[in-house]
Amino acid sequence: MQKRFFLISGLILLVFLACKQGAVAPEPLNIQDIKPIPAKEYSFTENPIWADEFNQSGLPDDQIWSYDVGGSGWGNNELQYYTKADLDNAHVENGVLTIEAKKESYEGKNYTSARLVTKGKKDFLYGRIEVRAKLPAGRGNWPAIWTLASQSEYGQTYWPDNGEIDIMEHVGYDPGVVHATVHTKAFNHVINTQKAGITQVPDFDQVFHVYRIDWTPEYVKAFIDGKEYFTFQNTGKGWEEWPFDKKQHLLLNIAVGGNWGGQKGVDDSIFPSKMLIDYVRVYGLKN
């Protein structure tokens, strides 16, 4: 047994030494040769899947737009009454949609305005949304360009469980500061966890700017005039953080006062107050 053991051990040693003598040392690793896995590239249709260029005069196109109506405060203690199909608060002229907030008594409120929505008419899942707009100035104004879910499939409450994307918000007491924000069950302003981007637009009330989001399965990005200033990434942790895999619709409005817009009061000398919109264009996600 001992002879056999020593014989086998000797053979193993000879094989090891032979392999070692004939082995070729590996080349040192070049870190520059390691390429990161690229993020998925998304592209959008060259032409809009739907758009409103506001080329007709009168009321906004009823094949695209409906109205949220009422003076309930809209969850934010807002002061205006939103009217329905009223030329005083929303009309199209010379290729521009005008949403107008006015100082007037109506249905128990001291202000009127309009909130246009595409729900049930132009709902969409993912895409590039562009709105070219000139914003109103003045303390108490709270104009917004934003989206909400077109259905309630997540959680116990419609908002914030089903998501909101604010393409543009501006409060008049903080002129020139534009916000893009997302709200979900996990991330929202009620619990002070909202995800937002802020940028400066000093001439917001003097010239038109293009407010845009790119919405894909992996992210929401916000831009002004093509310049990105906010990204919200899909965390992959479920609908509480990312409910944005269902259809949304677009909203355009001017609120008056409210929990945010009215933090420093309302200057009645600013009315009538107008948000001008040159066009709305929605491009489809290609891949």
Image (spheres, helix red, strand yellow):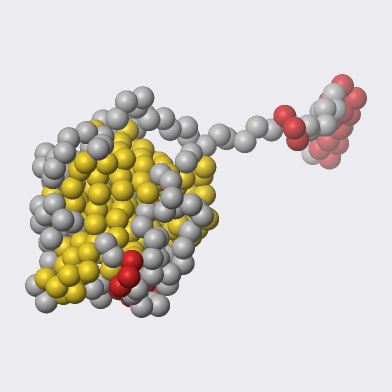
**Residue at far top of view:** 22
Towards the viewer: 284 or 38? 284
Quarter residue 110 falls in: bottom left
User: Which residue is rendered at x = 11% and y = 54% of the image?
Assistant: 86
Q: Position of residue 198 (x, y in %)?
A: 50, 58
Judge from the rendering whether residue 46 lies leftward or rightward of residue 62; answer left or right.
right
Q: Position of residue 51 (x, y in %)?
A: 25, 34
Q: Position of residue 80 (x, y in %)?
A: 21, 69
Q: Is residue 180 above or below residue 278?
A: below
Q: Position of residue 239 (x, y in %)?
A: 32, 56
User: Which residue is rendered at x = 75% and y = 32% of the image?
Assistant: 32
User: Which residue is rendered at x = 36% and y = 42% of the image?
Assistant: 132
Q: Is residue 224 above or below residue 259?
A: above
Towards the viewer: 221 or 8? 221
Quarter residue 182 falls in: bottom left
State which quarter of the image contains the N terminus. top right
State which quarter of the image contains the C terminus. top left
**Residue at far front of view:** 269
User: Which residue is rendered at x = 32% and y = 70% of the image?
Assistant: 269
Residue 271 visible here: yes
Quarter residue 158 falls in: bottom left
Q: Is residue 37 above or below residue 232?
A: above
Q: How many marks?
A: 0
Residue 181 visible here: no
